[in-house]
Image (spheres, rainbow, N blue to C red):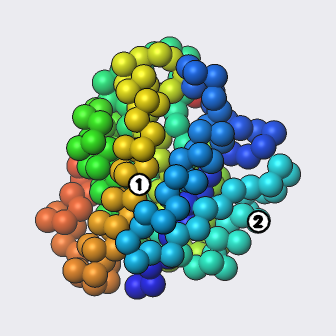
Amino acid sequence: MERKVAIIIGHREGNEGAVNYLGESEYSFNTRIAGKMEGLFHRVNAFAFSRERNESMSLLAEEIAEFNPALSIELHFNSFSQPVKGAVTEALIHHNSSIQTLVLSKIFLQEMQNEFKFGIRGALRVNQGDRGYINLNHLAVANSNIASILVEPVFGNFETSEAVEFFSREDDYVKVIVTTVNKFFKAMDKHGQARDFDRERHINISKLSTGCIRLEE
């Protein structure tokens, strides 16, 4: 497996997504996070992708497919109409996700829990009409072999203890993403192709897709 990674900066200029309690948008925050990853990956060719002001997600997905990464991680943070505490971290995955994607989502969620001790909402399978589906589906159509997750590490728009901790520890979040990528490739090297994974022993799919709280946007 070629060690290529696409780090996707969620949203774009002119549509910058949610704003955290500090007044910074998803696009601005995650552009900085992606920049901090430069040079930190171990034997991995990582490239950050972002959309131009009027660029569609379908066009960006085609550009990512040409790069032909083994995995992509799209960076976001969450928001809601009232404070959310406790279980705040989730990964969105396409409803037809590969086993590699499930492995990637599990590693990310475990690394977030290890580093920040936040409650985990889980890996949420998204269908048409669900939040995150359009982006994940464009990636799946452009290249179905890419393991793709959309990450929502915290609810950022209220000054909860989780949000305060998260936004004060940017470098630790960068470490979570980098470690996730490095551990993913290590797992692929160890276990080979997806068919070699024992679903229960290695990725616990049932645990990833149950017990997740769904909030309306």
* Of the two numbered discs 1 and 2 in the rendering, the one whose residue sits closer to the viewer: 1
In this figure, which residue is indicated by the disc labeled 2? 59
Is 120 displayed left or right of 14 in the figure?
left
The answer to which of 128 and 157 lies nearer the viewer is: 157
Query: Mark 1 — residue?
Result: 177
Query: Where does the C terminus fall, quadrant-wise?
Result: top right
Relative image position of residue 21 (x, y in whole percent): 56, 19
Question: Where is the N terminus found, in terms of image quarters?
Answer: bottom left
Q: Amino acid at mark 1?
A: Ile
Residue 29 in view, yes or no: yes
State the count of labels. Answer: 2
**Measuring 72% from the left and 64% from the top, which residue is drawn there?**
60
Q: Position of residue 81 (x, y in %)?
A: 55, 17
Q: Residue at x 58, y 21 (%)?
A: 22
Q: SS class of the residue under badge 1?
A: helix
**Residue at 42% across, 44% down:** 171
Residue 124 visible in the displayed image: no
Q: Is residue 96 left or right of residue 180?
A: right
The answer to whether residue 215 is above or below residue 99 is above
User: Could you classify mark 1 by the number of other residues whose Cα lies within 10 Å: few (under 14), some (14-19), or many (20 or more)?
Assistant: many
Disc 1 and disc 2: Cα gap in Å? 25 Å
| Residue drawn where x is 25% and y is 34% of the image | 117
Q: Quadrant of residue 17?
A: top right
Query: Are there few (<14), some (14-19), or many (20+) residues within 10 Å of tag 2?
Result: some
Amino acid type for the residue under numbered disc 2:
Leu
